[in-house]
Amino acid sequence: MKINEELNREIKEIKRVNKEELVQISDKLRGRIKELNCLYDISNFREKNDFSLDGLLQEIVNFIPPACKHPEITCARIILDQYEFTTKNFKDTKWKLSREIKVNNEQIGALEVCYLEEKSELAEGPFLNEVRNLITAIAESIAQIVEREWAEIEIRKCRNKIEELLKHD
């Protein structure tokens, strides 16, 4: 009789542990899905819209908080040269994750993500490694967008010069 009770207790414990593990795995998967959706939204928005660079950068900054673990207390900012694009709730806090935006190995700006209140639940700080990777990927994407925009401007300038030269011949 005692063996049956002990076996039943162990079975209940295993079920409880498995349920807790499943909840943790589900939470992590939901986080990765939010991050992937953010990257997809940025890519999709960039490809399907003919917005100005300013409009595109503003949309990118707005895509970031929903991809984070605590979207309700997350804000973001893109600083590019003298321009700044922020979420409506942006406030520069000490709980910040920042990544440089580089074009041709030259820093042209930064992407910053801040928590509006302390969330120090992790040993490496308030931001999960996955969020750190996401912010790095977004900063790299911004750099590519800016680089392409600058290249298109140069191409237009060259075309205009060629057209002017052809008119004078």
Image (cartoon, rainbow, N blue to C red):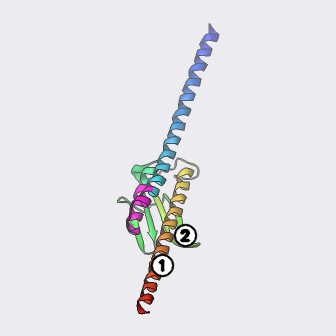
Earlier in the chain: of badge 2 and badge 1, it is 2
The spot of residue 46 in percent (x, y) is 43, 61
Residue range in magenta is 44-64
Instruction: Provide the secondary structure element on which disc 2 rests.
Output: strand
Q: Position of 13 compared to 92: left or right?
A: right
Query: Three-letter amino acid code at disc 2?
Result: Lys
Q: Which residue is mark 1?
A: 154
Q: Which residue is mark 2?
A: 102
Query: Three-letter amino acid code at disc 1?
Result: Glu
Kindly identify the residue that appears in the image at 63 percent across and 9 percent down. 2
Measure the alpha-carbon separation of dots 2 and 1. 19 Å
Q: Count residues near mark 1 (Cα–Cα under 10 Å), then give few for <14, some for 14-19, many for 20+.
A: few
In the image, residue 127 above or below residue 158: above
Query: Looking at the image, can residue 116 be seen?
Result: no
Q: Is residue 55 magenta?
A: yes
Q: Count residues near mark 2 (Cα–Cα under 10 Å), then give few for <14, some for 14-19, many for 20+.
A: some
Kindly identify the residue that appears in the image at 45 percent across and 86 percent down. 161
Q: Is residue 2 magenta?
A: no
Instruction: Examine the residues drawn in magenta and state their main secondary structure.
Output: helix
